[in-house]
Image: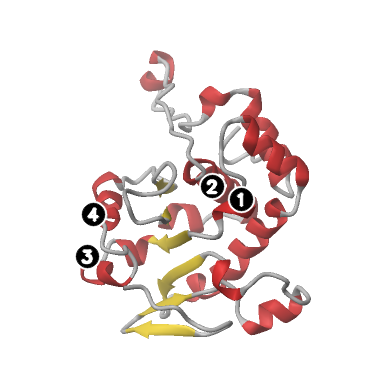
Amino acid sequence: MLPTTADGESEIYGTYSVTSPIYSSTWSVLWGPQTRSPDINPVFIHRIDNDKEKELGKRILDIVYYARDKKDCTEAFKAVGATPINDQILNTTIVTENAFTNEAFDENWTRGSDIGRQMRKYLTSTTNDLTWPGIFQNTGWRFIGLTNRAIDGKDDYLSVVIIHSLVHSGGVTGKDSQTWVEWTFGINPHDLRYLGEKYKEILKHCTREGHSKAFGQ
């Protein structure tokens, strides 16, 4: 079972850290007093011996809270039938590739489900996220898997990946919209392209950049 930890604390499992909430005490101070209970923020799971992943939690929180607090972003999510971010972070686990590819670690974050196996099954070199649409099975939780490809990008890239993932975890499924021309030239469009202008509205209102040249548009 995934442990419940106090504000700013982590449970260490060998080389992994299970942190709930995603922010540390320092992060909370930097952003001012928190009005939300510490147990209703995303759970973040990562390797503690990876310098890049140590700071990833702060970057993710910045992206998520920026989007969560914008009314236009909430409306954009509702327009595509996705659960608003403010309601999602009650029960969302975000896990990095370095953690979800370790089968032996599954028992510490999957809540008894086979979500870890599912993520490993669909992992490819061009995957940014492995996110189940909505709540996974009977766990009561949403799961977002971030690949190394996703977290290696710059902030504008990561922000779109996170928002894209939250649309999925909000209950919106992806669709293959690749044309034969794109297939011929090895172009792989993202799986929410079919949402058209509504997806662009999500990027416009839910990210600081308002778009991403690297991914999503």
Give the number of the mark in front: 2 or 3: 2
Q: Secondary structure at mark 1?
A: helix
How far separated are the C-alphas under marks 1 and 3? 29 Å
Place of residue 4 in the rendered image (x, y in percent of width and height, measured from the top left): 45, 78
Q: Which residue was labeled with disc 4?
A: 117
Disc 3, disc 4: CB below 8 Å?
yes
* Identity, as a three-letter code, of the amino acid under mark 4: Arg
Residue 109 location (% of width, % of height):
34, 67
Q: Which residue is mark 3?
A: 103
Spatial separation of the CA atoms under disc 2 and disc 1: 7 Å
Q: Which residue is mark 2?
A: 166
Residue 91 versus residue 22: which sits nearer the camera?
91
Q: Residues within 10 Å of mark 1 (few under 14, many from 20)?
A: many
Residue 85: which numbered mark, if any? Answer: 1
Q: Is residue 103 above or below residue 195?
A: below
Up/down of 171 relative to 41, above or below: above
Q: Residues within 10 Å of mark 4 (few under 14, many from 20)?
A: some
